Amino acid sequence: MGSSNVPPAQIPTSFGHELRACLRCRLIKTYDQFRESGCENCPFFKMDEDHERVVDCTTPNFNGIISVMDPTKSWAARWLRIGKFAPGCYTLAVSEALPEDLKNLCEDERVQYLPPKGV
Amino acid sequence: MPRRGGDEDDDDLEPEEEGYYEEDEPGQLYDEDEEEEEEEEDRRGSSRKRPRSAFIDDVAEEDDEEYEDSDEDYGGGGGGGGGGGRDKKKKTKKSGHEFFDLEAQVDSDDEEEEEEGEDDFIDNGGADLPDDDDGRRIHRRPLLPREDEQEDVEALERRIQARYARSSHADYDEETTDVDQQALLPSVRDPKLWMVKCAIGHEREAVVCLMQKSIDKGSELQIRSAVALDHLKNYIYIEADKEAHVKEACKGLRNIFSQKVLLVPIREMTDVLSVESKAIDLSRDTWVRMKIGTYKGDLAKVVDVDNVRQRVTVKLIPRIDLQALASKLEGREVVKKKAFVPPPRFMNIDEARELHIRVERRRDPMTGDYFENIGGMMFKDGFLYKTVSMKSISSQNIKPTFDELEKFRKPGENGENDMASLSTLFANRKKGHFVKGDAVIVIKGDLKNLKGWVEKVEEENVHIRPEMKGLPKTLAVNEKELCKYFEPGNHVKVVSGTQEGATGMVVKVEQHVLIILSDTTKEHIRVFADDVVESSEVTSGVTRIGDYELHDLVLLDNMSFGVIIRVESEAFQVLKGVPDRPEVALVKLREIKCKIDKKSSVQDRYKNTVAAKDVVRIIEGPCKGKQGPVEHIHRGILFIYDRHHLEHAGFICAKAHCCVIVGGSRANGDRNGDSYSRFGNLRTPPRIPQSPKRFSRGGHPMDSGGRHSHRGGRGGHDGLIGTTVKVRQGPFKGYRGRVVEVKGSLVRVELESQMKVVTVDRNFISDNVVVSTPYRDAPRYGSGSETPMHPSRTPLHPYMTPMRDPGATPIHDGMRTPMRDRAWNPYTPMSPPRDNWEDGNPGSWGTSPQYQPGSPPSRTYEAPTPGSGWASTPGGNYSEAGTPRDSSSAYANAPSPYLPSTPGGQPMTPNSASYLPGTPGGQPMTPGTGGLDAMSPVIGGDNEGPYFMQDILVNARRSGEDSVVGIFREVLPDGSCRIVLGSSGNGETITVLPNEMDVVVPRKNDKIKIMAGVLRGATVLDDSLMRKYFYAVKRWVTCVDLDLKRWRWQPEMMKLLGNSEEVGAVEGLVADSQQRWLDIMKLVPKWDITKKLGDLGVEDGCWVLAN
């Protein structure tokens, strides 16, 4: 994994409609992957425990995919503000914001959440 | 996460994981990591500073998250990854604790807890983890160099300052992040983005594969990231420091074609990544449009939204062919007519039943509404209810037209429901829709129908002063519940919508719809009250679509012509030029070929010259007796405006010889002056022969006007009149002009160069000029013909002798007309071409002078596409070649008149703003090239002449939107060009200015002519042959090729050259070969080129010369 030290996130097993993006960190995986193992960057969403959460925390509406091999050195990752996340496949932009309760959860967890622009 | 992933992962990953989880030394790995670290540091040059300062910055900018993340990066995750990195981190952290114990403490605790939680579910149930962590830190600490510590303290000071300078850690402030974003703009030290081709439709797959490969290969793969954009097919971007890394990474991936790797200029990097998040804001009652299928483009209204399944139910006006449906339901064969789309019509259940179509009435369990189900389709009130994917509708910027909304209103339905649907219309209201004093009416809620006046506008709330007594002085009403109110008798102006600009008086108010009596047309128009403001202004309303305006004379598709007498929302009414009876046609914009706006004149019944604005009386035909000023003249037909004529907007069409000029011969001198002044603008040859005799004589383009002073035909019998002559003796010796009158032995000659008429002895002139050089009159370019002596030896047709010695024809600067300069010469290059090249050159990034973060202005032109490689290089080619070519970069940024018809406007940098599906460099032509550069005197100024050549196809755009294809015939002496319309050249002959036309860009299999370079004038049979030729002479990359490539051969060239880096190598070749070509061509007559090319190894038959 380049010289990054974080183990990579799961890689999507397909490329089609099953893909969803985490609304906070924009990680892309399939619905099943999220359901089974949650989001590597946002474990506090506990998607793997509460499957309903997957629907709330992720969206199929996203635009573009970026595979970040080396988040620390990648300019693109920095620009997209995913430089601190695990290597993996992310989206460039999601079109939805987190629901309020999950935003609050982020706040409680003291993690930053930047809502997508224009939403 | 790592576990699950890791299980399936290669062994490569295994040790790393162990290192991560088992805290005790990952011994052998350590060395490796250190090595890596060193390597990294070497590369960065700035040594170890970077990770730390990044860390600090981030803490300052962002918040708690950073702690957690960086912890993952350097601490927690660092176990196996990088010993050095982790050590640093540990120390940092430690010092952090020392300095700001409280907050930092909390933070780190937090994140440790979190980490713990994360690790927890991954691995061992460990509250012992943090301790472990601590232990590790302490253990590692002595490894740290001392000076580092020192530096760190300073850094920390800064960090603390930054931290406390900000208000609090809890603000997720948008503004700050915007600023931060600027700080993240790419720098020269950052990895670069490379554009790589991949299989269409496999873009996502490609980047995911790269990710997988990176996981499998570990640090071997030196790329940083890979991007697949949804709107960019056929390409992905890869972020890496070196092109070699990209190629290496792509090796073995069958979806990625890495032969061609294009660097994205640094200032365009952010564009690549900025995609707009498509905010899907669908709610009930939203107006949307269907994107695909039978209903493509149709307006629909959302009735239900299923966000989870991404589907919406919309209400549409059905397009159903009941007959076909009946047949289908009965199992009969239905002949599918693909092109046929049934018109929208409300479903008539009874009709369906009559056709024995089974109609089931069902109740929707969810809504309780009843639907008619026909063949699986749901209908209600005649509407079709269709559930479709959200992706198949577009909801952005939907502005239903009045007509559409009218149609959508079910017949018989009153305005009640309409009001509801208006709410979405109101959503499109601009800010400041209501202003103080507007009369408004409440259309919703308890106060419905209350009228009042706007007092104050506050965001969404409008304070109104109600009309009714007994109510509070002002009431605050939501903007959406208000509608403008007008009363019959108000004079209003339409400010938006299709009728924008019209003014008139309100004659009726139907809810939100006003009926206005237009000031212009005296007709009723229906508009939304919302689109109207009260105004005393009287305007002509919509008088213009595209380039065509009310009362313009236009040429129609079928070569007929007429005057626009009315402008409707999408069409014109045209009074055609048929004299016998008034014929009015409804004409769509696209059916108009062009505007006819040249000034011509004809002769009336008594051979008086009639020009525009002359008042004539009709003395024959249906409109006999009418009179008025002539508005237009075309092909012997006059369009007369008689304001007493109540039909056809007052226009009458009559033959010229059915009219007489009113007032007979107007003052002669006056007329002459007039004609001279007009003569200055002369650019069209007559289309109407003034008299048969003259015509027989002439056909000469100079034989125009006919507005010369002779009248009554006295001198008209002399064959000399109208011919172009040259004065052989006397004070005007050498001048040329046209004979306007013959008086015995004297002739009056209108001098071409001086715009005056002189009297010369008939024996002093020679009229064989015309015979010998039919159209080679000294060029008289528009009005700029002050040049007294035209060096007529400068041939107008240099292309006839392409091989001429370049030095033979001096360029006469004085000859250039402003027009030419404008059209052919160069717009000041925005940047030296060399710079462009350097932008694309990895070695010189820092020098990029045009780095403008935020809004790269010229990305369309200089983009990292196959095409753009060219945009940035050939300029360099030429200048290197030492050819005087100051316009070399003109094509890179030419705001040229050619732009509209050049297909090069494709977005090169795919960003969502200028998104055209699937066209990254699909047509990588540079805008503005269409002919501009063909002109550039690449070969020693040899081509100083009109670049249009005989028999080439051109698009004439005579001040119209639609261009007409024609065949270029010749340049007229006045600088305008004669064109025969129609691609086969059988149409009408028209005259246009050079800047009104441009060459047609060849398509595959088109016969082409070489426009520039030494082979100018040569005809090449087709594209494939040319390509062969091109390859054959690839070693001789001449200017010819480069010129051609701007038409078409760019992609081939790119294929040939691989990537932009190699273009540099070719530059030298160009420089060399240009001279070589010149040398060869100078000596070789045209017909020998074939042979010469053969000598050079060019296959015979690869190219053909024009005869």
Image: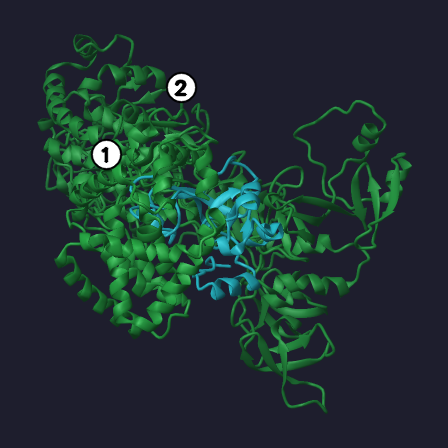
For mark 2, does the 10 Å Cα neighbourhood hold few (<14), some (14 to 19), or many (20 or more) residues? few
Judged by depth in the image, the label closer to the viewer, 1 or 2, is 2
Residue located at (25% from left, 31% from top):
B244
State the mark number for residue B1005: 2
- State the CA–CA distance, disc 1 to disc 2: 24 Å
- Residue B347 horizontal side relative to residue B586, left or right: right
- Residue B521 horizontal side relative to residue B728, left or right: right
- Residue B1091 horizontal side relative to residue B665, left or right: left
Q: Closer to the camera, B151 or B232?
A: B151
Q: Closer to the camera, B335 or B74?
A: B74
Residue located at (58% from left, 62% from top):
B520
What secondary structure is marked by label 1?
Answer: helix
Q: Chain A is drawn in which colour?
A: cyan
Q: Colour of chain B?
A: green
Q: Is any part of residue B743 visible from this angle?
A: no
Of the numbered discs 1 and 2, the one sitting upstream in the chain is 1
Pointer 1 residue: B935
Residue type (three-letter) at the residue carrying disc 2: Asn
